Image (cartoon, helix red, strand yellow):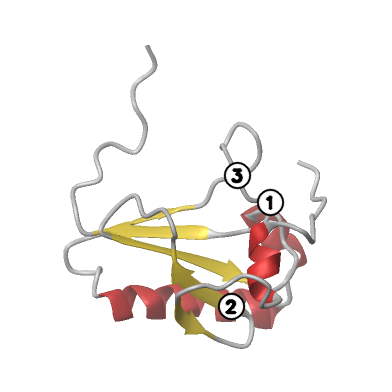
Amino acid sequence: MAHTYDPENIFAKILRGELPNKTVLETAHTLAFHDIYPQAPVHVLVIPKGPYVSYDHFAAAATDAEVLDYTRTIAKVCEMLEVGEKGFRLISNAGELGVQEVPHLHVHILSGRPLGRMLNPPA
């Protein structure tokens, strides 16, 4: 997968302060905020502040400090949202087949209702 980062994507604009967001948690390397089109009662996005397109790009190119901060921030956000006991889904889409809409690594933390099967069976 090519990892061409578009600095004009919506998350880059949020990180530069050009677009508002409803912040849940911000750290040195990570920003977590509420999704503007929530698909569940709890729907938070967690993005690294660095220019990474997808998780494989991030895992290969990010510094150890960025990887640790991002991972620990996801854990802290789950704790803050109190989703651990009842359950949650963590989703990261990558590329065309993964239906990635914004070319900046992000995970969705979803909870608050039954979320159904991960994938529908093929027709």
**In the drawing, does residue 24 fall left or right of residue 104?**
left
State which mark lies toward you, 2 or 3: 3
In the displayed structure, would residue 120 be above or below residue 81?
above
Quarter in which the C terminus is drawn: top left
| Of residues 28 and 41, the one drawn nearer to the viewer in this rendering | 41
Q: Which badge, 2 or 3, is on the more N-terminal residue?
A: 2
Q: Secondary structure at mark 3?
A: loop
Separation (CA) of disc 3 from disc 1: 7 Å
Answer above or below: position of 96 versus 84. Answer: above
Amino acid type at circle 2 is: Thr
Helix, strand or loop at disc 2?
Answer: strand
Q: Position of residue 68 (x, y in %)?
A: 58, 79
Residue 112: percent from left, percent from top? 21, 59
Between the residue at mark 2 and the residue at mark 3, the CA separation in whole angstroms equals 19 Å
Going by the numbered disc 1, the residue's amino acid type is Pro
Q: Residue at x 77, y 59 (%)?
A: 8
Residue 120 percent across, percent down from the top left = 34, 26
Q: Which residue is mark 3?
A: 101
Q: Which residue is identified by label 2? A: 30
Q: CA distance from mark 1 to mark 2?
A: 16 Å
From the viewer's side, name the closer residue of 66 and 50: 50
Q: Amino acid at mark 3?
A: Glu
Which quarter of the figure has residue 115?
Answer: top left
Report which residue position mark 1 lands on: 103
Instruction: Label 1, secondary structure: give it.
Output: loop
Badge 2 local density, few (<14 within 10 Å), some, or many (20+)?
Answer: many
Q: Quadrant of the N terminus?
A: top right
Q: Residue at x 27, y 58 (%)?
A: 111
User: Looking at this rendering, what residue extends furthest in the bottom direction?
Assistant: 28
Can you say whether 20 is above or below 111 in the image?
A: below
| Residues tagged 1 and 2 counted as in contact (Cβ below 8 A) | no
